[in-house]
Amino acid sequence: MKHQLDFEKPIIELQTKLDDLRKHPETHSMGISFEEEITLIEKKLAETRRQIFTHLTAWQRVQLARHPKRPYTLDYLQSTFTDFHELHGDRLYAEDRAIVGGFASLGEHKVLALGTQKGRDTKENILRNFGSAHPEGYRKALRLMKLANKFGLPIIALIDTAGAYPGIGAEERHIAEAIAVNLREMTLLEVPIIAVVIGEGGSGGALGIGVADRVLILENAYYSVISPEGCAAILWKERSAAAKAAEALRITARDLFELKLVDEIVPEPLGGAHTDRKAAADLVKQALLKNLAQLHAMPVADRLKQRYEKYRAYGHFLEKPAMSGEPTPAPAKRAPRKSSTATTGPAM
């Protein structure tokens, strides 16, 4: 089995043994049959798979979110959606293939579907810039979202990126400004918006298309302000502490749901979305249709208010209360402002 992860080794060993037994023909003349042993291994394999994938650590879920066989945005656009027609260009600078988008159908609904797209091999990763968009990618996304708003079409955003591209060219073309404008404009769009984190949700690169009425996340995806490796390099001075950082960051779907940073966890087939792409696509479709029906039932003004309040509620913090009998510190006094020397000319 290619691309096996470390924690999957017990499953691989059992599967290999099971495959070997199935290859042996039954030798009835000698009274030997492997059926009973095959049945026992099948049961043990199913139980081992269930035990492993229902007790994953945060770092193991990060590994699943990055699995090279995991369905990407274009896979969902071809399975969850139908009649997808891609649109290109930001009409300002260039076409960025790290973000794909266009009109599609979701069940009976006409929608705008867009998302970040990674590559399967080296050639495609270079074409898609490893799923890390440039400023023109976010400006293209905003152009398409405004077009959808004009025609009253809901917006579905699929998020799977390690982050926006941090290179010199992106800085020269104002990547931070492009993302900031998207954050502002997406809060004002009147059509329903649903964002789904299908793999990696990396910082502002994800948030640039992630301001939505409902934020969904797949069971083995993650959403974080920084990658576990980046956090480990800063806090522990070594990237090998990524597993420890993943736990500390609380970036898994369950953590994010408990912190009220996402609205719903979309289940995946046991073993991850890559083990059964059709089932994964169907589960995403069901979640989207359910949330879209709920959003369509809300008046526009109520939906916009709820969207605004949703993001205003992010970021809770606690302050240490003053101990009883402890004097409350007086507010600091500002130093008197020095008078400026007189000038003969008019004030500028």
Image (spheres, rainbow, N blue to C red):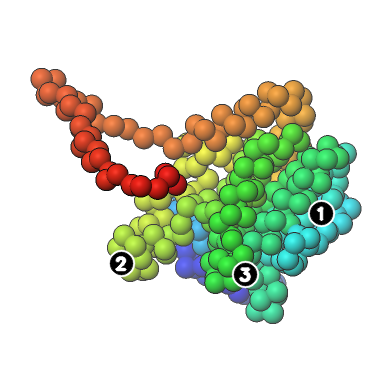
Location of residue 34 in the rendering, given as x and y in whole percent from the top left corner: 62, 67
Q: Is residue 69 among what the camera can see?
A: no
Amino acid bearing label 1: Gly
**Disc 3 target residue:** 130
Q: Left or right? Give the position of 329 relative to 135.
A: left
* For marks 3 and 1 on the same chain, the one whose residue lies earlier in the sequence: 1
Q: Residue at x 12, y 23 (%)?
A: 327
**Disc 1 target residue:** 102
Amino acid bearing label 3: Phe
Location of residue 8 in the rendering, given as x and y in whole percent from the top left corner: 51, 64
Image quadrant assignment for residue 264: top right
Q: Label 3 neighbourhood size at 10 Å, few (<14), some (14-19), many (20+)?
A: many
Observer-nearest of 52 and 167 = 167
* For marks 2 and 1 on the same chain, the one whose residue lies earlier in the sequence: 1
Amino acid bearing label 2: Lys
Residue at the left extreme, as displayed: 325
Q: Residue at x 47, y 52 (%)?
A: 225
Residue 237, numbered circle: 2
Residue at the front extreme, as displayed: 344
Observer-nearest of 251 and 134 = 134
